[in-house]
Amino acid sequence: MKKTVGKGILFYLFVLLSIVCGILCIFAGILIFSPGAEIFGLSYSHSEVETYYQKVADDNQNRFIGQLISESKIEKIIIESDNFDIYVNRENVVNVGFRVKNSYSGLSKHEQRKEAEVTNTFDKETRTYTIKVLGPECALWFSNASRVVLSLPDTFDMRNVDLEIKTNKSKVILGNTESYSYTFRNLSVTSESSSTIQLNSKISFTKDVKIISKNGEIRQLGTLDLNNFEIQTDNAKIVLNKIICSNELKLISESSAVKITEINGKMVYDAKSGVISINKITGEFSCSGRVNISNIQIGEAYGYVLLPKANTSNITIDKLYARARIITSSGNVKIGQAFSISYIETDSGKIEVTFNPDNSESQEFSGNLSTLKTNSGDIVANYNNVLLENEISTEKGNIVVNFNNNLEFNIEYACGKTPRFADGIPNKESLKEKGNITIGNGSTVNKLNIKNKKGILEIKDTFELAK
């Protein structure tokens, strides 16, 4: 009985919604085919108008924008828009100009704006040209393909010009061709809400780029060579290709998904949460103290990995060619191959590292080549090579050590209970809670010191480096 009643209610709701939708479609049809008609305060409006702006007032005369740029009288261009997409394109034009295309349709109230309002000004003192476009306002959009296009001639040089873009929720697309390069001095993009911001492969900047966008998507193609690159966002999808920074790339985020192909330079990651994946980085990678529950994934790290406050973040590095200092609370740390000096500490996280240090490390460093330390987490340490002093310690966790049986080094251990030894460990029957083990011919320099107060220690000689 209850099922029958429920189906009946759903049927009547479906009928009611169908009637409402039908009435709305009738009203919309009347408004569209009867221009000027008004129903419930709404009328149909549309536009297909395109206007070009190539000149601006200067000393009571209209002058070409491109000429003012060539004379260094314009060194900054500001484009402002609320709902017009913004493009920077190379086009078949003679002069630098702005193409404002007002293309939309929808239902709007009587008092709402029906056509775009455009103002363009030149401030001689600050050498700034500003174009501001306020688009139509609709209560219900049918379509909106409106855009502002900064049109550049093929051979025009913009390398001494700063470009600043301010938008509400529009797309910002910089670059439209593979044939010609675009070079500005600085770029600043600010978006108040969800936007798509894209830097195509042929655009470049001699100095800095700063992008501020609450959410949406930020995408960079090709190679970007510059001084600084800063991104500030709440929650965005960020995809970067190859970035060359003489100073640093800084990412400030609340929770974003970040994918980067390659960074040649330093990077600072300042995000509360989210996922960041970097295929290759040659400079230092560091994080701020705000990083909490991020998932940090690095393919190849050739610079110092400095994460002293990674908190509950999980960190994975496939190949670590430089030094690392990583400290988490409950975050897990996994390094596929560590070729250099590593200090890794967690409270309750799991540590898993394969060590394959280069012999050059022993010539330039004294002290612990590697330190793995936890309170209650487990540790898995694989050694394809043992150089200098190496320390593994945990209060409550378990430790597994596996090494290449062709090595020569010493192991000193202290445990709360008798460790488990593989068959190849010499004199394993006589070993108890504390002891020293000589591997191969031993070494006075290359050592492994292990402390495990309450957990289980297992030592094996079966490790082989995966090819």
Image: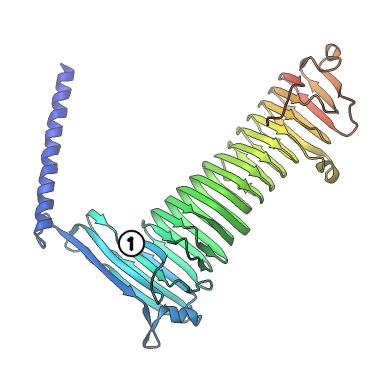
Percent of width and height locating residue 210: 51, 60
Taking the view exactly as shown, the residue that stands out farthest to the bottom is 60
| Quadrant of image for the C terminus | top right
Q: Quadrant of residue 99?
A: bottom left
- Check disc 1 and report the residue beneath it: 84
Residue lying at 68% horizontally and 48% vertically, measured from the top left: 303
Percent of width and height locating residue 32: 13, 56
Residue lying at 13% horizontally and 47% vertically, measured from the top left: 24
Taking the view exactly as shown, the residue that stands out farthest to the front is 179
Disc 1 residue type (three-letter): Phe
Res 289 seen here: no
Answer above or below: position of 199 versus 340: below
Q: Quadrant of residue 145?
A: bottom left
Give 452 or 195, whichever is nearer the viewer. 195
Q: How many marks?
A: 1
Q: How is the image coloured?
A: rainbow
In-image side of 436 versus 316 (left or right): right
Percent of width and height locating residue 324: 70, 42
Give 301 or 323, whichever is nearer the viewer. 301
Res 271 seen here: yes
SS for dot 1: loop
| Quadrant of image for the N terminus | top left
Percent of width and height locating residue 204: 53, 63
Answer above or below: position of 137 versus 465: below
In-image side of 361 versus 187 (left or right): right
Within 10 Å of the Cα at label 1, are there few (<14), some (14-19), or many (20+) other Cα atoms?
many
Residue lying at 45% horizontally and 71% vertically, measured from the top left: 154
In-image side of 402 versus 71 (left or right): right
